[in-house]
Image: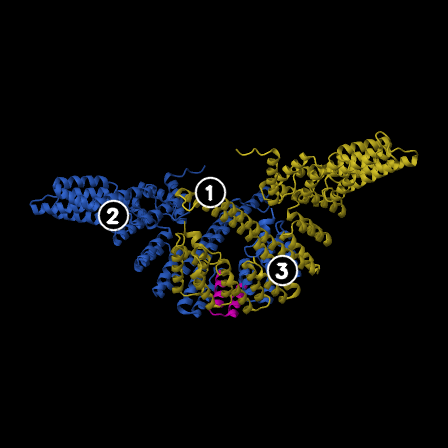
Chain colours: A blue, B yellow
Amino acid sequence: QHPQPTMSTKATIRKERYESRVKENKYDIEAWTWLINEAQQTGDLEVIRDMYERFLNVFPTSPKHWLAYLELELKYSNFNEVEALFTRCLKTVLSVDLWKFYLGYIRRINSGESGSSVTPEARAIIEKAYEYVLSNVGIDKDAGPIWADYIYFLKSAETSNTWEEQRKMDSMRRAYQKAVTIPLNNVEHLWKEYDQWENNLNRLTAKKFLGEKSSAYMTARTALREMRLFTDNINTNVVSLPPKWTANELAQLDLWKNYIQWEKSDPLQLEDDTAVMDRVAYTYQQAFLVLRLYPEIWYSFASYYLELNKPEKSLSILKQGIEIMPTSLLLNFSYAELCESRRQLDDARQAYDQLVTTLDKNIEDLKATAKQQIDKLHEEAEAERASLNLSDDIDGEVREQLRSREKHVKKEQDAIEKKLNDQVDVIARGGSLVWINYMRFARRTDGIKSARALFSRARKAANCTYHVYVSDALMEYHNSKDAVIAGKVFSLGQKSFADNPDFVCEYLDFLIEMNDDNNTRALFERTLATMPAEKAGPIWLKFLDYENKYGDLASIQSVEKRRIEAMATPSVNTMESFLKRQSYLDVRNIEDHELG
Amino acid sequence: QHPQPTMSTKATIRKERYESRVKENKYDIEAWTWLINEAQQTGDLEVIRDMYERFLNVFPTSPKHWLAYLELELKYSNFNEVEALFTRCLKTVLSVDLWKFYLGYIRRINSGESGSSVTPEARAIIEKAYEYVLSNVGIDKDAGPIWADYIYFLKSAETSNTWEEQRKMDSMRRAYQKAVTIPLNNVEHLWKEYDQWENNLNRLTAKKFLGEKSSAYMTARTALREMRLFTDNINTNVVSLPPKWTANELAQLDLWKNYIQWEKSDPLQLEDDTAVMDRVAYTYQQAFLVLRLYPEIWYSFASYYLELNKPEKSLSILKQGIEIMPTSLLLNFSYAELCESRRQLDDARQAYDQLVTTLDKNIEDLKATAKQQIDKLHEEAEAERASLNLSDDIDGEVREQLRSREKHVKKEQDAIEKKLNDQVDVIARGGSLVWINYMRFARRTDGIKSARALFSRARKAANCTYHVYVSDALMEYHNSKDAVIAGKVFSLGQKSFADNPDFVCEYLDFLIEMNDDNNTRALFERTLATMPAEKAGPIWLKFLDYENKYGDLASIQSVEKRRIEAMATPSVNTMESFLKRQSYLDVRNIEDHELG
């Protein structure tokens, strides 16, 4: 009988499982949640701290987890650690809850021993803290209670002379007048309070002061109602995950986009570009708390600054986005183009080089992971085989078992390889787009020779697709006006992509354009002789079209017949061929009007 | 008080209405049915005869109406007329009912006076008639009763000696043996009868004779069951109308196609090509009774003969189809191509010329009809105006009435013109396809000069679309290898089609291919300066693509900006432009993977 594993062994195994899950997919939030809980169970500060650090490294904008981390340190009265954490998170995580916590902390360490009144110095610090917090998150609709607290705090100031009293009134009025023009959740309540307060002070001046602000207050109240149409349905209680484009994600994304758009329209009628920009930027920052891994939000933010003629800000946003998503083509291409238009050519070049390197590395990593998985598969199979303790004369049943096991391993290996190839293909195509853009950039900024040098680099890259060849060939033809070099590039591509119908079609288009009949026909024949029928469909169609437009009837009919024989599917027949030929551009009268 | 119109006046008005309906649309079967009924009400033979003639001219394959017409003449014992009608319809309308009627007629005029026995000469005539009928429609599944009658007729022959008796037995056996191998509706009954008959004659020879046919009978019985899957759902009780592509029409067409396909597969395992061909041809003929105005059935029948290496038959079928549908591109192009491959070049030329002329005439007719309608509209409006008896000082209400009436007239006129333009456009595009094919034909058979002459003719044709220019230009470039002439043809086209974005795009593609940067940019600028924004979308996109691939960054961004300004729709914005540029061929990684 096997010994019962101890609880701790069981827990260790389970922990390892979750650890390997987050290792494989760092965004596996379920596994993270389990690991954090497990760390908390240990009660070991170092262990929990380490877990939070690891988690926040992946999810640096999760207010909930920063708060939990802060609360932990505060529980141990580690004030230095708390303050260090505030330094790390406050400015990047514009969460009202987090900033409220900060305020609470400042009030706590600055209030005297229990019951004793606050010293003037401490009051000054707290007041500064309020101002600091409100200048950062004061326009948040959820910042209403902070405003209310602030005003209450101001009210509670003790005064000893008229001058001080006057000063207190002024600062309270300033606070009220600011707050009632912001679409705060409690703006109506604040307005009523303010109204009462002014009227209690002086009925005459009240009329004047309230009159000055009432229209802005009304606008803010209306804006709050409009804003809620977006915010009520936006879910902020999630961590930033890479989009999987689920219906829910798309709906949330749309809400955010509309919300941002609404802020851009200046619903508060601020007539102050900076103020509008601040509100819009705040909204983008809010969006980043949950949509941090959506390149389009970063792009949109950068474009917004560019429209306002603030290219530095735009560049900085793009740079931040690229740091978070180094392989985003949207962000990198935008960044490189902006650098190019500002003649920061080295920066642009660096962006392209970084992309090329990172994408290549990603492919290498994928391949390495796949290899590990396959190796493990074989090891396990080998171990199982060994455990069977096979002698020389194994019986049929065991042999059958082995065969079925081998088949299973083969199938799993195929699945891993298929997945790898699909993933590599996407990245390789992206990488080719980078090379194409990089080559265009080089041509524009440094001439064709520089572009050619990049093409040589691209060709040597392991994961370059045919698109790079086509793009380079056509650049040679259209920019250098050199059909010979263009032809050479195509025939270079032919060496690697002769079995790719898309490439061959591009090559054929080029040869046809060049009126190079001999090579056109030769390429048709060579391709059709070797390419399997299931891939050759487009080549046959092009051949048919070519002969139909420029050949003689015998050639047309011969290609027609050969195509039908080669394709050997019921949908490819004489009538289908005939109809394909009897149309021109968008004129398909026979199909449109004569056939059922 | 107006006088009450007499019944006859009322009837005349109604009749005129139906007459004008069939004049406007000769396939208005409802109107025809009313007119035939009305003619029959008159009881006037000449009137009814005239109506049938007119109807059968439009619907020459309607067995029901031929039968009605025949019955009418027979009622008046107009035997000459009856026989003349048989001559006109029998061979072209392979309807069992019609041929049965013919048989009945032959039997009636050849049977002696009531009760008296038939003379040997008359018997011979009737027997010949049976043979004639069965050789024409004997393979029809509904011809079973004719076969049964025929055998009964043979049985009823009186014999006076063994030799005659033997001869009678032989012909009966021949008939039985033929009939039981055809999938006739009553084939099982015929087989039982035949079995009994042979066994009554001689049990020994019966086994031999029945054994010879039993397998073919079984096949026929199975085939009948299969055939019913098609025929049970085919509706033959309709006249041939031009397809409107309703769901029901498409379903019927599909049934027919499958039925014909099934016959081609030789379900009776005849192993006799001619016999299979006869059955297939018979099925096509049956299809024509209701699908006479479906070009694809004619095309399919012609192709069938061509596959069997019977081009003359194929040509003859196509010719028949063209006679019925002179503007069918499917039939005319097939015919012309077949003529060309048989070097009957004059016939091909004639087909193209016929098409060009007929299509032009169709357009003229449409225009004339539209003009008539518009003229009538204005006349009516004028008459109404006159009836208002307007003096110089008309009051506001009347003026308002007049204005509203004028607006109404304008609206109706617009509707007529819109419909006309749509119809003309379809025909003009078809006509251009004819010119394009005609030019290719001329180039292949007579050289480029001949094709050029046709292009000159096409250009002068009123309804030539831009496609003809593009086709001719590219023919000049690819066949004569003359980019200069090609360019001239394009710039000739530009004179007529400068406001057509599709044409301009083709022209631009050509200039770009020719690396003619100056003219490319000039054409872009000229077009974008004059073409309205709602049409210029594709031109802007092409310009953007062109600059993006081969221009400098400043030009790219300038075109991008200009495009957004010019298009002025929310969907055309910086991001959309950027994305359009940041893709290459089928690689759209940003849209596919980075955006929601």
Neighbour tally class for label 3: few under 14, some 14-19, many 20 plus, Cα within 10 Å: many
Rounded to the nearest angstrom, the CA distance separating label 3 from label 1 is 57 Å
**Chain of the residue under label 3:** B
**Chain of the residue under label 2:** A
As shown in the figure, which amino acid type bears the numbered disc 3? Tyr
Residue B520 vs A580, above or below: the answer is: below
3 vs 2, front mark: 3
Secondary element at image label 3: helix
Q: Magenta span has A472?
A: yes
Neighbour tally class for label 2: few under 14, some 14-19, many 20 plus, Cα within 10 Å: some
2 vs 1, front mark: 1
**Chain of the residue under label 1:** B
Q: Mark 1 points at which residue?
A: B388
Neighbour tally class for label 1: few under 14, some 14-19, many 20 plus, Cα within 10 Å: few
Farthest left residue? A161
Q: Mark 2 points at which residue?
A: A137
Q: Residue at x 67, y 51 (%)?
A: B322
Are the residues under marks 3 and 2 on the same chain? no
Decide: marks 3, 1 in contact (CB < 8 A)? Answer: no
